[in-house]
């Protein structure tokens, strides 16, 4: 399975999610990315799972999922079919 992203050192400080993505530390405001995580307890925040491919992060106690590409602002568009005359 191809690994999309390498996710390490996930933590919360104040109202921020801080995580190393592909070797670079990134900081995200919880109010901008997830009202559920912003309201979650420390216990709920600390119980997370990184997908084996590094595609996303899941918090099972609050049923919240974040896509790493979404956090990074990477948009994916479906391939368009070429029309023939």
Image: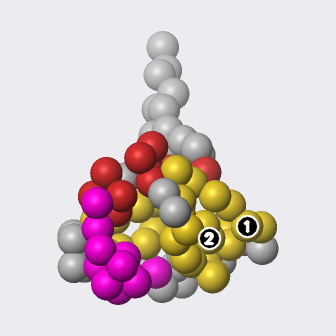
Q: Is residue 21 above or below residue 71?
A: below
Residue picked out by circle 2 = 19
Q: Is residue 3 left or right of residue 65?
A: right
Residue picked out by circle 1 = 25
Residue sitting at 63 percent across and 82 percent down?
A: 9
Q: Which mark is residue 65?
A: none
Say which element carries label 1: strand
Residue span colored magenta? 39-50
Q: Verify whether residue 49 appears in magenta.
A: yes
Residue sitting at 48 percent across and 14 percent down?
A: 85
Q: Residue 56: where, in percent of width, then height?
A: 45, 69
- Answer whether labels 2 and 1 touch (C-beta < 8 Å): yes
Does the image show residue 56?
A: yes
Say which element carries label 2: strand
Residue sitting at 31 percent across and 84 percent down?
A: 43
Assess disc 2: are there few (<14), some (14-19) or many (≥20) residues with their C-alpha within 10 Å of its C-alpha: some
Position of the N terminus by quadrant: bottom right
């Amino acid at each position: 399975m191809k690994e999309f992203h390498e996710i390490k050192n996930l933590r919360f400080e104040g109202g921020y999610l801080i995580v190393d993505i592909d070797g670079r530390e990134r900081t995200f405001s919880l109010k901008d990315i997830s009202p559920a995580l912003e309201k979650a307890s420390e216990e709920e925040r600390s119980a997370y799972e990184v997908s084996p491919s590094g595609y996303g992060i899941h918090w099972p106690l609050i049923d919240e999922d974040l896509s790493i590409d979404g956090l990074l602002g990477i948009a994916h568009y479906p391939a368009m079919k070429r029309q023939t005359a």
